[in-house]
Image (cartoon, helix red, strand yellow):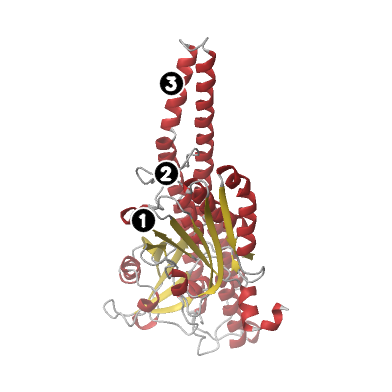
Amino acid sequence: MPLFEPPAATPRAPAPGAWRIVLSGGAGVGMLLLQAAMSPAESGRPLALAALAGVFTAGLALLSRRPRRSGPAEAASPADDAARMLDFQAALEALPDPVLVVTATERDDVVGHRVAFANAPAREFLRIQRDGAILVTAVRNPEVLEAVDQALFEGVERTAAYETGGVQDRFWRAWTRPLPPGPRGLRRGLLYMRDETDARRMEQMRADFLANASHELRTPLASLTGFIETLRGHARDDAGARDKFLGIMQAQAERMSRLIADLLSLSRIELNEHIPPGGSSDLSAVAMDVADALAPLAREKGVRLDLVTPPLGVALVSGDRDQLVQVAQNLIDNALKYTPADSSVEIEVTADLTVDQALAARRAGTAKLSLLTPDRAEAARYALLRVRDHGPGISRQHLPRLTERFYRVEGQKSGDRMGTGLGLAIVKHIVNRHRGGLMVESTPGDGAAFSVYFPLGDDEAAVRADPARAA
């Protein structure tokens, strides 16, 4: 969309180097914004915003100069001015964050608040057409709209923070600043927006890690301290007690190691949860590899792993293979913990399902709950991984809390290997990053089944559209 209307008359050429100053200012703004993005502090952003507003002000001043009589050497054609405006606009288009110029004449005229200019990131984020848009149709947050009004009609700089909805939460901060007014009482203001999701997630990750680590590590540390004091005291010369206590201490140390590893893994997943993964992976191959890796543990417990998958190349999903392996490993390992000897863990992969088909119950009379449902898209198809155990099952009232950190169902025994309580939380966040879904079915006394489903990858979609490509 054009930033400025071209002048009606042939204008006087800007002073030598003026446009070079404006365009250099645009490049400088880009560097300032990049520096502000890399800095966790807020101090650099007002400076970047002030520089950006200065570039706009300079551009407005140059383009609004009245023509005057001049000699041939000073004359400039409308084509030259149009080219300079395009260069100025290109510099703004190259900025990494959404930038808008908003115009209005009356504060109460909502329809009259128009987007005079939006750079490429703003058009993509706010879905603005190049021919302009009514501001309220693009920006619906009341605090941001109020900040824009204060910049337009009160000449006040404002900052507003807000959160967008959806399965993947995004955190944004908006800055507004007044610009010089236009002709016939036209008010102009600058709206600059920044995605602060990564910074917010990093802060939340640090807070959660400290809170969870301090809480969950307290018990094994207290146990280790108690046994060390005992071994240094009356059990110093008791070989039997020493071996027993050392075995318990080793188990507690290993539990702390697993807990720290899971906390760090969960923190990393949450940090990038809003960024969809690239590439594609075969869900059948993932299930086969994890089943092979856990087969020795299953044999040790006397449990069978019954695996049913479609042929390789059919269940191709959009996803990070390492994280998909982590999902399958957590689900199958969890099923092994609760499945008694001489029983089985059933692992099934199904491809080319709709969301409704993926959510359909596999057993009649069971309690079913969707723990995570993706944002639905037209004609979206999914591949599903279902893992069922034959353990004690889970009562209906416990199902909604299964993906909470450290939540454990009271009275359930998980065998000799104590978990960290983070497995299903990790599964949920990985599935959410992959824009997939998670469901649980369970009946007390008849086991539980967990299903995860992921969008089919582009390769699989192409094969379904052209079956000849599968040959």
Q: Within 10 Å of the Cα at label 1, are there few (<14), some (14-19), or many (20+) other Cα atoms?
A: some
Q: Within 10 Å of the Cα at label 2, are there few (<14), some (14-19), or many (20+) other Cα atoms?
A: few
Per the image, label 2 sits on a secondary structure element best described as helix
In this view, the residue in front, 436 or 109, is: 436
Mark 1 and mark 3 lie on one chain; the one further toward the N terminus is 3
The residue most toward the bottom is 8
> Residue 296, image x and y in percent?
63, 45
Q: Is residue 261 left or right of residue 217?
A: right
Residue at the image position 60 percent from the left and 49 percent from the top: 294
> Residue 337, image x and y in percent?
49, 46
In this view, the residue in front, 193 or 52, is: 193
Of tags 2 and 3, which is closer to the observer? 3
Location of the C terminus by quadrant is bottom right
Reading the image, the residue beneath label 3 is 226
Q: Amino acid at mark 3?
A: Gly
Reading the image, the residue beneath label 1 is 399
Of tags 1 and 3, which is closer to the observer? 1
Mark 2 and mark 3 lie on one chain; the one further toward the N terminus is 2
Reading the image, the residue beneath label 2 is 207
Please tell me whether residue 78 is drawn above or below residue 18 in the rendered image: below
